[in-house]
Image (cartoon, helix red, strand yellow):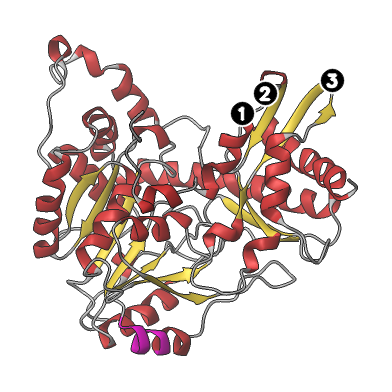
Amino acid sequence: MANKPELSDYFKARIPSDIRLAQIEFDKREDKSEIIELNTAIGNVSLPMHPAMIDRMNNLSKGDIFKEGIVKYSPTAGIKDAQNAFLNVIAASGFETKNLHSLITDGGSMAMELVILAFCGPAGSGKKPLMLINPAYANYDTMAERVGRKTISVNRNLQENGEYTFPAMEDFDKLMEKEKPAAIVIIPYDNPTGQFVPHKIMAEIGKLCIKHDMWMVSDEAYRELYYTDDKPSSIWALTNKEVPGIEGRRVSIESASKVWNACGLRTGSIVTDNKEFWKKAVAEYTANLCSNVIGQHIFSALGELDKNSLQEWFTKQRDYYKQRIIDMTEEIKRLVPGIIVSLPEASIYSVVDLRNIKKDFDGRDFVMHCAKEGKVNIGNKDYTFLAAPMEGFYHNLKKNPGKTRMRIAYVLPPKEMDLVPKVFSKLLSEYLNN
């Protein structure tokens, strides 16, 4: 019998993302149909989309767009209405969009990959790496590995009061000088920490990008989801007047997933003020032909809305998440004395740290326990809890502080989300007492 062909070494080493790991393991359970899984491992928002998007979705087949069931490719850069929709929502936050260019991508994830390909490399050389801030959204490191590029990181720390420190500017400066990164990724409304990065810090990092001749990339999937008294923070608030030389090196990654509650549309965008980069990004994306055309047309509905109506939507989303996250954070701390929970400043996540509960606590092992066998009965129903172990959000460290931590996403319907602290605390007690 002939030997089977081998997979590449890269594929042989591939394991699921920590964001998807718990769900994959839970789906293997023989008793899964009898258990309600409270899946907070992934930011899979369960709220309805903006009404204009819902209306567009419900009427796609009634106009000429998909007449007689014909769905053609769009231009590679995306349909103009979708490009304009992303610029319109940036403008609604109060930022100038006159000289910005948009490329529609299959979700923010594809935008990440294009940015890494555009700025870092050559592949396999380790040169011109991508700079991140630990803990960083896990998929940036995965995307860089996929295309043979290197990442480097500066670190922030989770304190006992739940507040994340932010790296000192001299730490950024030293690492930039040593490693010569091509670009840095900032997430102003941070995933996974929930930390808010205000304008002042964005400007300071921008000045370092000028000093070290780097691109500045801002992942703004959660723009306007902040729960402090600050104004919206964005790369588009940085101008040559405040940060001389910043214009022409600005890039934002946009998404329909979070603020617009449309994760499954897989519609994102690269927005930039550098036309040459935009043209080359479009050229690279021609290999993908175009992004999801149905998603583009649905998201395009936002291009027709004025600033006031979009601001009303932003306020509605903030109001929904703010109190929910605060209440959830306090309830988890009440039920699990000694637990550390990151402060809810922005985005839709909290990091929980069990280092004070058990010195050698293994967050990944606990997540696997919950996914594979854990269950608790509440109101005559069996539940388990799924979260994302934080180890995969840390990069380039010999000792991983994420070992005792997990990320919780506030994405379940309210009645299910309200059960999370109780289910989590009961499963934790069961796990620790085994």
Q: Is residue 192 left or right of residue 150?
A: right
Residue picked out by circle 2? 32
> What quarter of the picture does the N terminus occupy?
top left
Question: Where's residue 362, x and y in %?
Answer: 72, 57
Q: Which residues are magenta?
A: 174-180
Residue in view at x 56 percent, y 43 percent = 21
Q: Nearer the viewer, mark 2 or mark 1?
A: 1
Q: Identify which residue, 432 or 187, lies in the foreground.
A: 432
Given the image, on which type of amino acid does mark 1 rest? Lys
Tell which residue pokes out farthest to the top in this image.
Answer: 68
Residue 59 occupies quadrant: top left
Q: Residue at x 50, y 43 (%)?
A: 317
Residue positioned 85% across, 49% down in the render = 335
In the picture of the structure, the residue carrying the numbered disc 3 is 380
Question: Which SS class for mark 2?
Answer: helix
**Residue 88, position as x, y percentages in the image:** 25, 47
Q: Residues within 10 Å of mark 3 (few under 14, many from 20)?
A: few
How much space separates mark 1 and mark 3, taking CA atoms?
A: 23 Å
The residue closer to the viewer here, 88 or 119, is: 119
Q: Residues within 10 Å of mark 1 (few under 14, many from 20)?
A: few
Q: CA distance from mark 2 to mark 1?
A: 8 Å
- Residue 28: which disc? 1
In the rendered image, the vertical position of residue 32 relative to residue 18, given as above or below:
above
- Report the amino acid beneath label 3: Asn
- Residue 163 at least partly seen: yes
What is the residue that sits farthest to the front in this orientation?
1
